[in-house]
Amino acid sequence: MVSHEGSRGAAEGGSSGPVRSRQELLAWNTALDAVHSPTFIHDTDYRIVAANSAYCELAGFPLTALEGLPYWEAFPLRDGPLPACRGALEARQQQGCLLDETLITIEEIVLADGETFLSRSFSLEPTEPGSHFVHVLERIVPTGTAVGSAADADEPSLPPHGRDGVILTDEAGRIAFCNPRSESLLGQQFARLRGQELSAFLLPEPAGETAPQREASGSQEAMLFHTEGYLIPIELVCKEILLGARRYRHYALYDLGERCLERTPLNELLHWDPVTELPNRLLLHKRLEQALTAAEYRASPLAVLSLGIEAPGAAACDEATSALEEGLIGQIGAHLRSALRGRDTIARLGLRELGVLAPRLRTPDDAARVAERLLAELATPFTVGGCTVPITVHVGLSVYPDQSIAAADLVQQASAAMGEARQRGAPYHFASKGLTERAQARIQLAAELRQAFAEEQLTVHYQPQIDLGSGGWIGYEALLRWPHPERGWISPGQFMPMVERTGLIVHLGDWVLEQACHQAQRRLEGGEPLDRMAVNLAAPQLLSADFVEKVLAILERSGLPARYLELEITEGLLVAPDDATVEKLQALRRAGVRIAIDDFGTGYSALSYLKDLPVDRLKVDRSFVSSLCRDPRASTIVRSIVGLAGKLGFAVIAEGIETEAQRSALVEAGCRQGQGFLFAYPSAAPEPPP
């Protein structure tokens, strides 16, 4: 992966790209000075190796100060590389591929004062493994009379903002630029959209996209696929333009759906329930029809859920039952709306019936998880008009492609399945028999998991952590295990997702932490030279308000000094942590507890946050360890992680070591600690070697 460090040296021929002589760099600078627009060249570590006078003036630095500096520390000032630039480089390094020599990435830069630039970048040596990249910056003039220099005065401007989308495609129909509104309409960032064919997001395909040689001007109506799985009706206006010496197609995207469904009095009456302010049955049908078209085209499942609401205690309240039920349905709808994904739709179908459209599921079985999440959200009684009302909810599900493709049929099948669930006294029921049987198996396993926790069937095993040089044991990682009395050992991959869905994660996490601290203290009292006991944390534990107090109380009860406890947090929790989370970790570190990032490397974008986080150790993800001996890129990534950790003052440990070759490769890469089956399997009472 690409390192985002700000150290100098690449201008002198660092490790990325071919070594360049001073004469060659001077020749580049001389050539760039012939270019009117601000222009610079950087290497694969994003460090500036050459720049023209216009760029130096724009950045406010002489060339001698810019050489070797990451370009985002000069101009444009940012927290890291430009998204398209970074995306192209990371894709190249991950896939080990060379760049298309004709590829030019185009992206918009909006400064804090509103000034806008267009950056065009391309590779100087597309066919060489190490390459340098040129960025040409052109000002976008708001009047629309010029883009870049005076020589470009006849070129059209690209509006960076506005209500409507703007997309540029190259002559092959691939997206080369889009503004923020287009990103919103498509549901993806430009870094992901760049290089994809626009026709893949349109139904039908726009004129000119399937026949690049054909003139592609004019307008037409089309349906735009949003990445969340629904369709947006748009008017597409296309014209050909020139940017520099290159020809592009300029598309303006006008959202017809937004304009025809604005909350006008007529549309309020037609499409929204006046009591709950939720979409009504008609609007649900419209969105379902669009989602079905997208699901058929994309071959992705969707589900319709019918929620039957019963409030047997409502009659006991003083308030009129009808008014209370209306208020209750409104509260339930608002509550569920905040619990659903942004792509989902919740609607009112009847007096005591709500409907949910859940598009773009990974598998039909995911519909059961949606139902379980909704039922969990509705388990707590609601308070309406000063009266506490417990409710009973039954859910019916119909799933495309298991059932009919007609929108009305899917809704009807979901309602019938809800009635079947009510008759059977089941929490939910599928219109499909096969899906119902799989869901019942999950429900049974979840019930057995709760029983196992209540009856103390669960246990904690400990996997040793090893000094890779000496082979000595230096610590342990605590791991939850389930020895089922009838099924035998249940795989953590099977029951851990259920732990999260059933709400047991905080209770079980706290229990594992308590068991691990007592185990560590017993080993210390027995004279074992223990350095640490590592315990995994789940996000709900870390987010609980009293988390720090609970950890400190467990340490006090066990007698374990805080310096022996290491809490492992997955990298995803720390990519963009809030202040409260960071403060909790800092409070624990002040008390002596150590913090490790688990599965490190799977979310490499988090590197920019590391220097500001209270972290002591990085745990290299097992996926890199398993690839060490067959993929040179894995070795490069591990070396980068070890090097980064050393500069930031972190220790490093690797997990999942299964062979001697992997151990040797890790030692050679600079990693000194590890764990895995090569050394010891997790067990309830591991015994260190003599």
Image: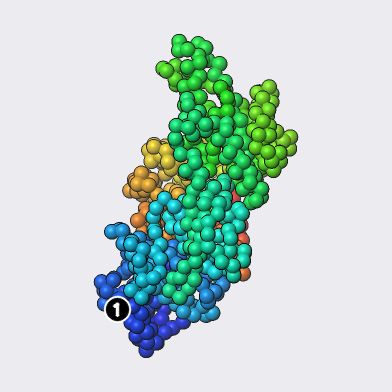
Q: Which residue position holds label 1?
A: 53
Q: Where is residue 180 drawn, in percent x and y?
A: 43, 55
306 to the left or right of 611? right
77 to the left or right of 243? left
Q: Where is residue 92 drawn, in percent x and y?
A: 53, 70
Q: Residue at x 46, y 82 (%)?
A: 18
648 to the left or right of 339? left
Q: Residue at x 63, y 43 (%)?
A: 292
Q: Is residue 352 visible?
A: yes
Among all residues in the image, which is located at the extreme front?
218
Which of the colour schemes (rainbow, by chain, secondary structure, one colour) is used? rainbow
Q: Picture quarter containing residue 550? A: top left
Q: Residues within 10 Å of mark 1 (few under 14, many from 20)?
A: many
Q: Is residue 515 visible?
A: no
In the image, 226 versus 12, the foreground residue is 226
Among all residues in the image, which is located at the extreme right?
433
Query: Label 1's element?
Result: helix
Q: Picture quarter containing residue 310? A: top right
Q: Where is residue 666 drawn, in percent x and y?
A: 53, 67
